[in-house]
Image (cartoon, rainbow, N blue to C red):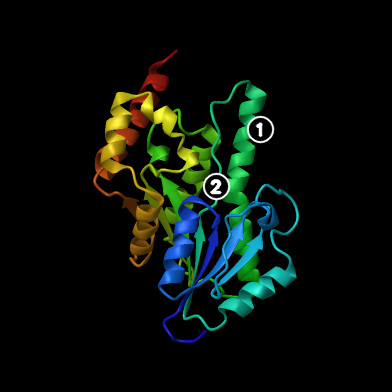
Amino acid sequence: MTDNGQIGYIITGHTGGIGKELASLVLHRGHKVIGIARSNLKEQNQSYDHPQLSELHCDFSRVEGNMLSHEQLEVIQEALIDCSEIVYILNAGQNQGPDCTVVEMLDTVVNLINVNAIAQLKLLNELLMHRANMIDKCIFIGSYLTFLSSSQASIGYVLSKNILQELTLRYQERSSSLRLQTIVLGGVYTPMNRQEEIDKNPMRRWLGKLFRLSPEQAARSIIRASELNSPIKFVPALPAVPVSALYHGRIFLRSLFHFFRR
C-alpha cells in the first residue's frame, strides 16, 4: 500500500439506502469504492458509473462455497493496491416482518443471521486469506433495535446485529492489526424500517421525528464515526444511555422473574 491518503472502501449493499449514500459520499471525497451487491447488477438500475467504483455481485444467502471467486478477489486487490488504507463496511442486510408458525420463525432466524452476519464475515475472511492484512478496518452497521422490543425487527435481524456487536467488544481483548468497530444507528428512512409500523405508535412517531436519520445523514455519521478509535459508536449518541439502561434493566428483571418462578 502507498501513503497517498486515498482510502479504499469495500461496501456491501451499495446499490440502495445507506450503502448507496456511503458509496456516493466517499467517491465524492476522492476515495475508491468496491461495491458488493446482493442483487444481480444486471437486473437492477441502481448502480452507476464512476471511474473510482468497481461493482461485484455476491449472493449472501448462499450457505456453502466461497462468497467470491478468485478472479473477483483479484479485481479487489488490483483496484485497491495503491490505497493507504482499506476499510470494509458490512452494510448489506435484510429484515422481515412478523413471523407466523414456529417453522417459519426458525427458518427466518437462520436466513437472516446468515445474510446479515455469517456470510459477510465469511467474505471478510476470504479477503484476509487472499492477502494477509488486506483489510485495515472492518465496520459493522448495528442498530438501536437490538436494545428495543420492536415489531419492526424480527428475531433473526436482532440476533445477527447482536452477534456483530458482541464480536466487536470481545475482539478488543485480542491484539491484531485488523480493527473492528460497530456503529449503532437509530432509525433510518429506508424501506427496511417499515415506516408504517412506526406511524401506528404515537410515541415511536414522536421519537422518530427527533432521532430518525435520512440515508444521507446516516452515511455522513458513519464516515465521521469510522474515523474514531472507539469500538462502539452510537448514532445519534443521546439515546444511548437511557436505551442501554432500559435494555439491561429489562434483562435483569426477566432473569429474576424466571429465577423465582416455579
**Quadrant of image for the C terminus:** top left
Q: Residue at x 39, y 26 (%)?
A: 255
Q: Which residue is mark 2?
A: 93
Which quarter of the picture shows residue 245? top left
Whole-angstrom CA distance, mark 2 to mark 1, is 16 Å
Front disc: 2 or 1: 2
Decide if residue 249 is in sight here.
no
Q: Residue at x 66, y 74 (%)?
A: 75
Please name the amino acid that badge 1 sits on.
Asp
Label 2 environment density (alpha carbons within 10 Å; few <14, some 14–19, many ≥20): many
Q: Residue at x 30, y 25 (%)?
A: 202
Q: Is residue 228 left or right of residue 13?
A: left
Q: Position of residue 144 (x, y in %)?
A: 38, 42
Instruction: Label 2: state its secondary structure.
Output: loop
Taking 3 as reference, is 255 above or below it? above
Which quarter of the picture shows residue 261? top left
Which quarter of the picture shows residue 41? bottom right
Taking 183 as reference, is 197 above or below it? above
Q: Is residue 93 left or right of residue 224?
A: right
The outermost residue toward the right is 65
Q: Is residue 92 left or right of residue 61?
A: left
Please name the amino acid that badge 2 sits on.
Gly
Instruction: Label 1: state its secondary structure.
Output: helix
Q: Nearer the viewer, residue 51 or 91?
A: 51
Q: Is residue 22 left or right of residue 73?
A: left
Q: Position of residue 133 (x, y in %)?
A: 55, 75
Which label's residue is closer to the chain start, 2 or 1? 2
Q: Which residue is mark 1?
A: 107
Q: Position of residue 60 (x, y in %)?
A: 65, 51
